[in-house]
Image (tube, rainbow, N blue to C red):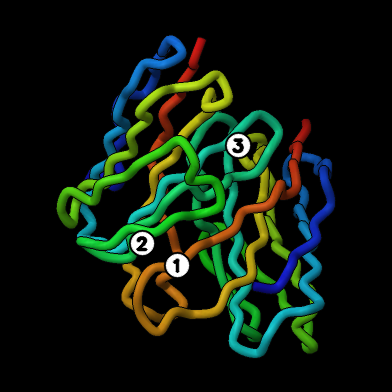
Amino acid sequence: NAGVTQTPKFQVLKTGQSMTLQCAQDMNHNSMYWYRQDPGMGLRLIYYSASEGTTDKGEVPNGYNVSRLNKREFSLRLESAAPSQTSVYFCASTTGTGGSGANVLTFGAGSRLTVL
Amino acid sequence: DAKTTQPTSMDCAEGRAANLPCNHSTISGNEYVYWYRQIHSQGPQYIIHGLKNNETNEMASLIITEDRKSSTLILPHATLRDTAVYYCIVRARLTGGGNKLTFGTGTQLKVEL
């Protein structure tokens, strides 16, 4: 049982390049999330998907797009990368079906992105 | 969501109990207290949550005051591997649909020999 898998683990981009971070979960979770974490800061929510077919903006959505490809997969795309997007990106998932357990998130190991 | 306040950092001797406080004086009656931790460079990990009763699992204990305005996460026998940032989050249970958990800057716990 892999949980939440993120690829790639590391990526270096030049300003203006595009790339997609992939996230997949095998826990049959309904809700999925993308967070970013900058040095010395807490996690900030970029986008989330409450259920398959829906996506919503989080706290810092500018410069990103997302796709909930199916129930398992939730991708994050940077169309034109900027140095300010240098960060560690975490994907997470949860049942999302209600109850206190719906706030129990399982996180991936992170994707470290550097934009030069 | 209720705002939480945590100390920036704490130290603990290995083998001793680590008591991490969290203040959530504006918590609503339907909001739970959740604790996560993040070991350096890894994704956050869920620890425990509770509503008003004290809770215990294999990782930790959660003590919530009777007025629910504060709580304490207890690691009974801290080890070096417990060195991490600990996040206290207050959030209502869902009735359906997605949720947005907000992670602050947490408490950096350093366990030392």
Q: Chain of mark 3?
A: B
Q: Which residue is mark 3?
A: B81
Give the residue displayed 49% in from the left and 15% down from the top: A115
Q: Identify residue type, mark 1.
A: Asn
Give the residue displayed 19% in from the left and 51% down from the top: A72
Q: Nearer the viewer, mark 2 or mark 1?
A: 1
- Residue nearest the observer in this picture, B74 or A34: A34
For marks 2 and 3, give the CA distance: 26 Å
Q: Chain of mark 1?
A: B
> Are both tags, 2 and 3, on one chain?
no
SS assignment at label 3: helix
Give the residue displayed 59% in from the left and 77% down from the top: B32
- Within 10 Å of disc 3 (Cα), the crowding (few <14, some 14-19, many 20+) is few
Q: Earlier in the sequence, mark 3 or mark 1?
A: 3
Give the residue displayed 83% in from the left and 41% down from the top: B11
SS assignment at label 2: strand
Q: Nearer the viewer, mark 3 or mark 1?
A: 1
* Marks 2 and 1 in Cβ contact (< 8 Å): yes
Q: Which mark is residue B99?
A: 1
Q: Which residue is mark 2?
A: A94
Q: Identify residue type, mark 3.
A: Arg
